[in-house]
Image (cartoon, rainbow, N blue to C red):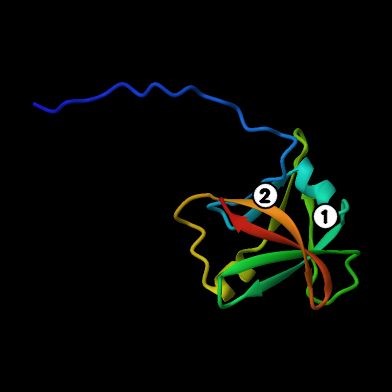
Amino acid sequence: MRHFEAFKGRYRPADKTLPRATIRRDGRLGFNQATYTLLGSPTHIVFYFEKETGTIALKPSDGNELYAFPVACHPQYPSYYISCRLFLRDIGIQYRRGPSIFKPTIEQGLDGELVVLEAV
């Protein structure tokens, strides 16, 4: 006979004021209003990738860069997403196994200020 123990934790909804981003199973990068604001409410994003650590970074764009991806807004919720399957496949990130959650932070990069996605 197995001995199960009751889980005594409680459900706590996510704090919507904290920046969060996820890579979804369909190959989209989704993020909340706090992350969108942290990015400066851009219309486009340029992706950066650090091969040594597998870290993704984002730079806001007005869409004039050749490599800029458009940011879409969910029609009913204050959430945003970028279709980025091509980027994820190119850098070798397996997005189909389920969502990955990230905490965005600001760091200085070679091309200026970047929003870095650190895995939670």
Residue 19: where, in percent of width, then height?
72, 45
Badge 1 is on which residue?
Answer: 39
* Label 2 sits on residue: 30
Residue plotted at (39% across, 21% down): 8
The residue type indicated by label 1 comes to Leu
Residue 15 location, x and y as percent? 67, 32
Callout 1: helix, strand or loop? loop
- Which amino acid type is marked by label 2? Gly
How many angstroms separate mark 2 from mark 1 (CA)? Answer: 13 Å
Task: Tell which of 65 and 48 is nearer to you.
Answer: 48
**Is 82 or 58 nearer to us in this picture?**
58
Element on which disc 2 rests: strand
Badge 1 crowding class, 10 Å Cα cut-off, few under 14, some 14 to 19, many 20 or more, is many
Q: Is residue 85 above or below residue 65?
A: above
Precedes in sequence: disc 2 or disc 1: 2
In the image, 63 versus 12, the foreground residue is: 12
